Image (cartoon, rainbow, N blue to C red):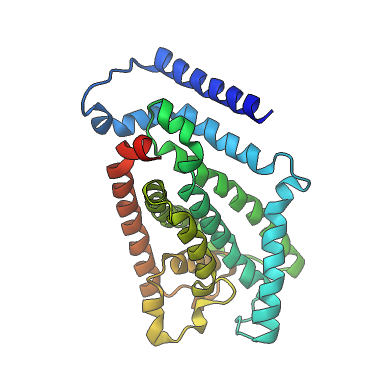
Amino acid sequence: MHRACCSSREQLLRGIFEVSIATDFELIIEPGRAHRRYWRDLWRYRELFYFLSWRDILVRYKQTVLGVSWSVIRPLLTMIVFTIVFGRIAKLPHAGVPYALLVYAGLLPWNFMSTALTEMSASLTSNTNLLTKVYFPRLVIPASALITSFVDLLISFVILLCVMGVYRFMPPWHMVLLPLAAVLAVVATAGCGLLFCALNVKYRDFRYVVPFIVQFGVYISPVGFGSDVIPAKWRLLYSINPAVGVIDAFRWCLLGRPGDLYLPGFLLSTAVSFVLLWYGLMIFRRTEREFADVV
């Protein structure tokens, strides 16, 4: 059954490639062409990007008892645990905002970043059949994994609105800037994801490094608490972590707490995120031509 499923997927992918080549453009193989026309080829293979994204979404929830509910249960249970530990036991300050909302607003971007980073880093090694058989811009594969995690973010956001309704909390006008915070989350995640994706193909040790980074990152990022609990003299240094700027931006947009948006730290986190995107894309493009040989 598994072999039949894989065979049908490969046939569908071949069909996409054949249709794209036959209808959209004439494929000419020559030295240096892939490098010169990389971004144009990336646009021409957009149908493959759509297919891989849809396939990953279906695979994630197919043959599961709860289906999409997993995207709801995980952040809700984590919110309850963090609220009890940090809000009730540690009694950390929350500036008049219900602590459950404070935690959920931090979990919203963190779950997206951690899930996307994990799936992007393993995306190439889990699609070896595609890498070794046909040419296409390899950037399509980790990008589709990123989109799949973004769908979970949208589902969790709807649940956050419901939780706000339960607490009768009115979002501030900052909420209109939430798409910009989401773009920043994508930038920060894409940079790290592309870097680890490229390194994971050549050095398989990174399949153990990435889960450790995700597990360790939840404690050094302001997920279960607000960044304003960090002493002022350390807050700028703390903001080197790109997740800090992303989580603070989400909280400021959703809750409107003045202490969440520390402007120097936010600018530093934003700069680090864009530097990581540039560096991750550079490493990915530099090692891309070797993927089929070492995967």
Can residue 202 be seen in this snapshot? yes
Classify residue 133 by image quadrant: top left
Q: Residue at x 55, y 68 (%)?
A: 251
Q: Of residues 238 and 284, which is closer to you in this image?
A: 284
Q: Position of residue 283 (x, y in %)?
A: 30, 49
Name the residue: 35% across, 36% down. Answer: 293
Is 212 rendered above or below residue 286? below
Q: Is residue 164 visible?
A: no
The residue lying toward the viewer, choosing from 141 and 124, is 124
- Closer to the camera in the image, 208 or 103: 208
Q: Is residue 29 left or right of residue 254?
A: left
Where does residue 6 sit, x and y in percent of width and height?
59, 28
- Residue 98: image x %, image y %? 68, 75
**Where does residue 141 sit, x and y in percent of width and height?**
46, 38
> In terms of image quadrants, where is residue 37?
top left
Q: Which residue, as the protein is rendered here, is positioned at the far left?
A: 31
